[in-house]
Amino acid sequence: MGIQTGNYLTPQRLNTRSVRARRTNTLSLSSGAVTAISFDAEDFDNSSMFAATSTIITLPIGGLWGFAAGGVFASNGTGLRRLLVDVNGSGTYPWIDSRSAVSGDNTAITLSDTHVAAAGDQLQLFAHQNSGGALNLLAGVRFSAWLIEF
């Protein structure tokens, strides 16, 4: 895949494919477990990239894709909180954002980057915490992807 050159705006370049999935309720996370986040709502999806109650966003065409995720963990002053993104079920998590727990306040994490994808690549968002006990990932977690260039 090469980035297109020139100052040409074509219908293909303007037809940005994008999706944003959202979780509408809390998710209890066991301490030390890496947990796939299931989503139950879509804010938009103009290329059928997400199926309701799924954990996966499927990128329909190859190209340079942007993605972003954000979530808030319930207040607890012990350990770390992480959001992790996996590609095609590899279990290697090439993108991770980690924050120390915040005592007396919720811990918010955002993560964004780009991925050079092949058609059919699947992105999946995971959460991890190690507080020593169960901890909630609060409602409102979002996971989105958008085509930058094909």
Image (cartoon, rainbow, N blue to C red):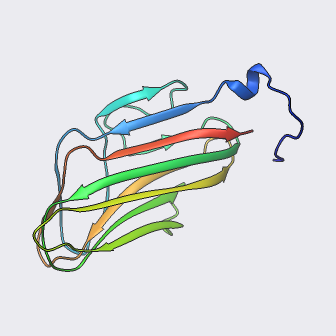
Which corner quadrant of the image does residue 137 belong to? bottom left
The residue that appears at 51% across and 69% down in the rendered structure is: 92
Left or right of residue 141, residue 120 in this image: right
Q: Is residue 34 visible?
A: no
Please, is residue 77 above or below residue 65 in the view?
below
Position of residue 44 relative to residue 53, above or below, is above
Please give left or right for residue 34 compared with residue 123 in the image.
left
**In the figure, 53 relative to 30: above or below?**
above
Q: What's the residue at 66%, 40% (across, down)?
A: 148
Find residue 1 and report its horizontal and vertical position in percent.
81, 47
Pick the residue in front: 48 or 105: 105
Q: Is residue 48 above or below residue 60?
A: above
Name, please, the residue furthest toward the right: 6
Residue at left offset 63%, top offset 29%? 16
**Which x, y percent locates residue 140?**
25, 43
Q: Report x, y in % for residue 77.
A: 14, 76
Closer to the camera, 91 or 59? 59
Q: How many marks?
A: 0
Q: Is residue 134 visible?
A: yes
Q: Quadrant of the C terminus?
A: top right
Residue that appears at 28% across and 35% down: 40
